[in-house]
């Protein structure tokens, strides 16, 4: 079971995020990025990163996932929060990373997505039946 959502930044960068459930409390996230002007349909991405996620827990309504990412060094906590449109902000997914080695990779990135993608990702999360997030 997997879902892919897309985001286009103001600078023309195109990002695709794929989240796949691989076990009861495990998932995989893959983020592909194309620079401005590149065609994501027929050109390879300039960045293509995949990470395994474990201790995955989610809100029942599908609006948030919290987990650990399996990387070299200490495994950081990663939180994905899926927001419906709330003026003046459009629908988005907020990804927050905390606990990387020396805090080098810590931070928050907001990806604007469509309302349809918010619905699609929330349905994926609820259908995945990850353990409930407190």
Image: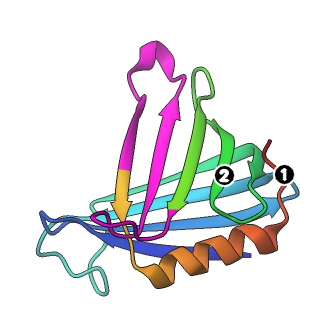
Rounded to the nearest whole Å, what is the CA distance between mark 1 and mark 2? Answer: 9 Å
- Image check: 42 left or right of 98? left
Task: Reply yes or no: does residue 103 show up in magenta.
Answer: yes
- The answer to whether 81 is drawn above or below residue 115 in the figure is above
- Image check: 39 left or right of 119? left
SS under mark 2: strand
Crowding at label 2, few (<14), some or many (≥20) Cα neighbours within 10 Å?
many
What's the residue at 11%, 75% (across, down)?
37
Kindly identify which residue carries mark 1: 132
Q: Which mark is residue 94?
A: none
Q: Earlier in the sequence, mark 1 or mark 2?
A: 2
Kindly identify which residue carries mark 2: 65
Question: Which quarter of the figure is the C terminus placed in?
Answer: top right
The image position of residue 38, as x and y in percent, is 17, 75
Crowding at label 1, few (<14), some or many (≥20) Cα neighbours within 10 Å?
some
- Image check: 32 left or right of 9? right
The image position of residue 14, as x and y in percent, is 27, 70
When asked about the image quadrant of residue 42, the answer is: bottom left
Q: Nearer the viewer, residue 77 or 35?
A: 77
The image position of residue 5, as x and y in percent, is 47, 74
What's the residue at 71%, 67% (across, down)?
125
- The answer to whether 102 is drawn above or below residue 21 in the figure is above
The image position of residue 62, as x and y in percent, is 69, 65
Q: How is the image coloured?
A: rainbow
Q: Nearer the viewer, residue 30 or 8?
A: 8
**Stretch of the chain drawn in magenta:** 83-109
């Amino acid at each position: 079971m997997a879902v892919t959502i897309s985001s286009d930044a103001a600078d023309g960068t195109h990002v695709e995020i794929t989240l796949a459930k691989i076990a009861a409390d495990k998932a995989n996230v893959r983020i592909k990025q194309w620079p401005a002007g590149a065609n994501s349909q027929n050109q390879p991405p300039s960045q293509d990163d995949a990470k395994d996620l474990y201790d995955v827990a989610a809100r029942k309504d599908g609006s948030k996932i919290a987990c650990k990412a399996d990387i070299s060094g200490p495994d950081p906590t990663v939180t994905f929060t899926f927001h419906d449109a709330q003026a003046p902000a459009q629908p988005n997914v907020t990804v927050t990373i905390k606990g990387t080695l020396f805090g080098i990779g810590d931070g928050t990135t907001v990806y604007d997505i469509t309302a349809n993608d918010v619905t699609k990702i929330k349905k994926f999360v609820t259908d995945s039946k990850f353990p409930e997030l407190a």
